[in-house]
Structures are given as C-alpha cells and as structure tokens.
Image (cartoon, rainbow, N blue to C red):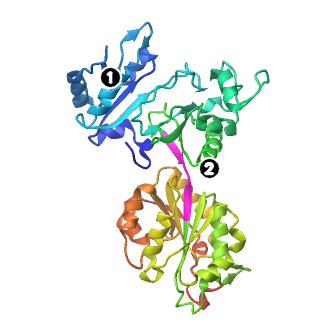
Amino acid sequence: MAARAAPFFDLRDAAATGHRAIVTHTARIAAFQTAWAPATVEVTGDELPLSALEFALNAQGWCLLTGPVVSDRRAGISLAALDTLVRRCADFEIGVLSIEADGSKMRPVKAPGEHEPVVPAATTVLMPVMGLDALEAEISDRWVHRPEQVRQVLGLPEDELVRLTPAMAARLMLHAAGGAKARPAAARLAVLLNKADDPTRLTLGRLTARTIAGQGELALIAAAGELTQRPVLERWAPVAAILLAAGAATRMGRPKQVEIVDGQPMVVRAVLTALDSGVDQVIVVTGAHAELVNAALAPLREDRRVQLVHNLQWASGQASSMHLGLATLRPAVEAALFMPVDQPYLTPLLLRRLLQAWRKGAPIAAPQVAGLLRGAPAIFDGSRFATLLGIRGDVGGRALLQSQQTLVTPIPADPAWLHDIDQPDDLI
C-alpha cells in the first residue's frame, strides 16, 4: 500500500474491513512464530500453492506464507516465489503484503550484515524495527545483534563502553548501512520503535522519534506485544503550520496583519507561536498587504522553517490561500496545522495539544470552548488534504470540520486564547 499513514494499517483492521493481507518473510524465523497467525501456508519451492493460499484467505482474511521447517527455524520464501506473489496481489485482492526481510536473533536492535536485508524492489514502505529496551543499554552482545557493526555505522570506538542514546538510535535507523539499508528509491521509510510499554521507554521513544521526524522521516511508537490495544501509540513525522494572512481586513479598516499587539505585529506573533509549538515548517500565505507582511517578517526569514508565499487570487476567498499553503508543503509533511493571523493570544500550549492529538491518531483536531468546536486553529492529517483541496470560496477548513465532526478530536481551550481581532474594538 502506498498512502499517507499506511503504517497505521493493522492486519486486524484489514480482515475486519474485508481486505485481505499476507504476512511472509525472506529471512528465517523461529518455527514457533507460526502459532501467531490464524492460518499458515507453506511454500516448498518457487511455486506458490495458490489453492491453499486462496482457501486460507477466504477462511481468515489473512495468513502467514512461510517456507519449510529447518531445525527449529522456518526458511524464508524464495525471491522467485515472492515476485510471483507481488504480481498476483491484485488477483487475490491483497490490501497489505508484509514481508519480514531481516532478523535480530531476539535482540532489540541490530545493524544488517553484508547479505541483509533481502528487500524486494516493489517495496512501498520499508520499516526498520527497534525495541526501546535497547536505549540507554550498552552497545554489546547482550542487547545488540552485531554490536561491532553498530559501532562502525555510528563511528564509535571499538573498545569504549558506550550506551545507546536516542540520538544514536535515530541515526542508526536512518543510516544507509543501518535501518535504511537496501531502501528502494520509491519506498517510504517508517521506523517502528517498539516496546513503549512503560513511561520511561515512551519518553525515550519520543526523543528518538522527534529526531527522526526532524530528518523528514516517519517514526511510529508502538507496544506491539500488547494485544488489548492498538499497537501504534504515536506517530511522529514532519508537520507544517499554514498561517493564513492574505485578507484585506476591511472590517478593521487597516492591515490587521501588522497591527501591534503587546509590542509585536500580529503576523510576527503568529509565526513565533507556530515555531514555539515545534512544527517543522511555517508557511505564511500573503495577499492584500503582502509588502507590509514581508517587511514585518524580514527578521524571521533567516529561519529556514519559515516560508512566505503570495496568493495572487487572495480576493477569491480563504479557500484559495488554503490550497496554496497545501501546495507549498514539503513532500515529507504528514499533517497541516491551519492558523489565522488574527488570534494574537494563541498559546503554543494549545498548538502542542493539537499536535499531540494528531500524533495519537486523530485525523482532525480542533479547539473546543463550552462544548462547541471552534474552526481555528485546527490540524488536519494528510489523508484529508484532498478534501480540503475541494473546498471553494471564502471558507477554510471549518467546512470540513462541520461536515466530518465525528472525525474531530476536540481539545479543550481557554476562550481568551481564541480571541479574534476583526475590528479596532476587539483590541484588548
């Protein structure tokens, strides 16, 4: 599958929604692992047992496709069989094909050997996995498979006692000789940080995930062994704030984008608030008063996260500014936080709460005051971008909030944070 947030897709979800899924492997696995699948189909050569596979999928919705038992292990399927399987996915109506391409001898972290991993060219998502119990542990045989290789990848001395830090772990997972080894050019990287089953590991996982997201990649924090809950606890990826600052401010009677509030132009306050929230990109969409906005933001233009774009069609309404902001997003951005320019008392705390709601899986999150949803600021997952691009006229994301309220996670907010400045009397 090649779609935003695809790594959130669970095999149980696939079966429950009528999709089919196959789990298979090119590396050897422990023989006892077959007990975890609802059905197992064995491949003994390069030919797929198509009838057995069809029967298992019809009965269970998903199955394990594995090689024969060799001692206490299961051999991986051949590349020829895997190529056939990839070609037949459409025939079998397969929605998810998951391939284990490498193993770590039951250690929580590793670096691949010369012959690993065996990654098919058709791979759409490459997912290196690390157990969070490896963090702050020694880089030694006890915790690491091939510790000498890990040290080499990280540029660490061979004879010095070193513990694996979150920064080291992120670098290892993203390295072309580490977690990203053999990544096909078109494949997306999604680092899975597993075993976040206590507060300490969750905190260390967040530190690692934040670094990975800062490098433009996706990280998933999971507790995959806990079957009573969804395995993915949080997703971390680049997020952008889109600041809508293109309006003519006719009710204000003067350019409110540069109206001074507590010693700063409102547009400057908004950009600083967005930056303080931890977003990776801030897009300011200008329009009617572009020259004044550009001048006010000149001191912030050195920050590479800040980008100004001019909407030539600003008079057509807010939707055109929203569309331009979405078109300006960096390719790795997974969610967009829309902000108005005229809420000068917005706090980074509220924006961080919106971001955290998205990280926990919310497709949309917006502030709530006295039980009522407010339209801005609001965060939208990338899966909603196509719908936002279909909105026309002088409306923004509020239309989508109203039409899809069941998808919105409400975030309680102080009404003072959302105070709008529409006319001179609104200044407090």
State the extent of the magenta-drawn residues as a range. Answer: 232-241
Q: Quadrant of the N terminus?
A: top left
Query: Which residue is most to the right?
Result: 160
75 shown above or below 280: above
**SS class of the residue under badge 1?**
helix
| Amino acid residing under circle 1 | Ala
275 shown above or below 145: below
41 shown above or below 350: above
The disc label shown at residue 81, or none: 1
**SS class of the residue under badge 2?**
helix
- Left or right: residue 125 compared with residue 83: right
**Which secondary structure class fits the magenta region best?**
strand
The residue singled out by tag 2 in the image is 214
State the CA–CA distance, disc 2 to disc 1. Answer: 38 Å
> Label 2: few (<14), some or many (≥20) within 10 Å?
some
In the picture, residue 155 is in which quadrant?
top right
